[in-house]
Image (cartoon, rainbow, N blue to C red):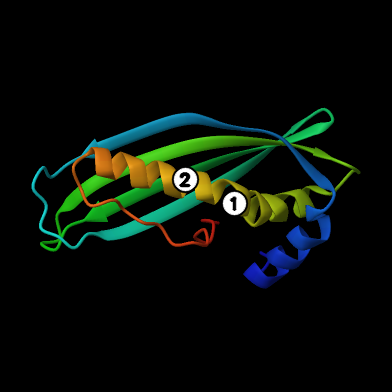
Amino acid sequence: MASLEELKQRSDRITADMSLIDLRLRRVKADLLQIFPVLDLEIWPEVKPTLTRLDAYVAYDVTYNLTAQDAKGRRTVEASASFTLIFEPKEAFANDDLTAFGSIGALSIVHPYVRELFHSLTSRMGLPPLLLEVMPPDPVP
């Protein structure tokens, strides 16, 4: 299995040759499990990108799963969101390179949308808005 640094290098090599065609929110699920949580909330995000080749295009389905617990250790929020990104590569790339790009480059593109979505969802649940880190979490192998 490639190290995170190797994935970054492979992703960087092909980033300039990938044109984003579409980015869509495909699924959202959110549950407020504690109506009156004891603040501060602790957040655990996980992310899993998957690659699909579509003729001349490459699609990445990126699913974020988020769990938050309150200061008493009670699960407070469970949420997940799936986005699809479709790219048109300017040349043919090996699956290893495309997988590396999905783990690094595609996540860099979709992460700001995910941050805004979870921020908005939690504030609409009556919680302090959850703020994900600026950089996406490392993908789950």
Q: Quadrant of residue 83?
A: top right
Near-viewer residue (114 or 129): 129
Q: State the mark number for residue 35.
A: none
Near-viewer residue (22 or 66): 22
Q: Secondary structure at mark 1?
A: helix
Q: Amino acid at mark 1?
A: Leu
Quarter of the rendering occupied by the C terminus: bottom right
Percent coordinates x, y for residue 21 in the rendering: 73, 33
Left or right, 45 with respect to 35, comes to: right
Residue at (11, 52) in percent of width and height: 37
Q: Secondary structure at mark 2?
A: helix
Percent coordinates x, y for residue 50 in the rendering: 61, 42
Q: State the mark number for residue 114.
A: 2
Near-viewer residue (106 or 113): 113
The span from disc 2 to disc 1 (Cα, nearest Å) is 10 Å
Residue at (30, 36) in percent of width and height: 30
The residue identified by callout 1 is 107
Percent coordinates x, y for residue 92 in the rendering: 89, 43
Near-viewer residue (115 or 93): 115
Quarter of the rendering occupied by the N terminus: bottom right
Left or right, 14 with respect to 76, comes to: right
Q: Quadrant of residue 35?
A: top left
How many numbered badges does the structure rendering display? Answer: 2
* Image: 9 above or below 23: below
Q: Amino acid at mark 2?
A: Val
Residue at (53, 50) in percent of width and height: 111
Q: Residue furthest right?
A: 91
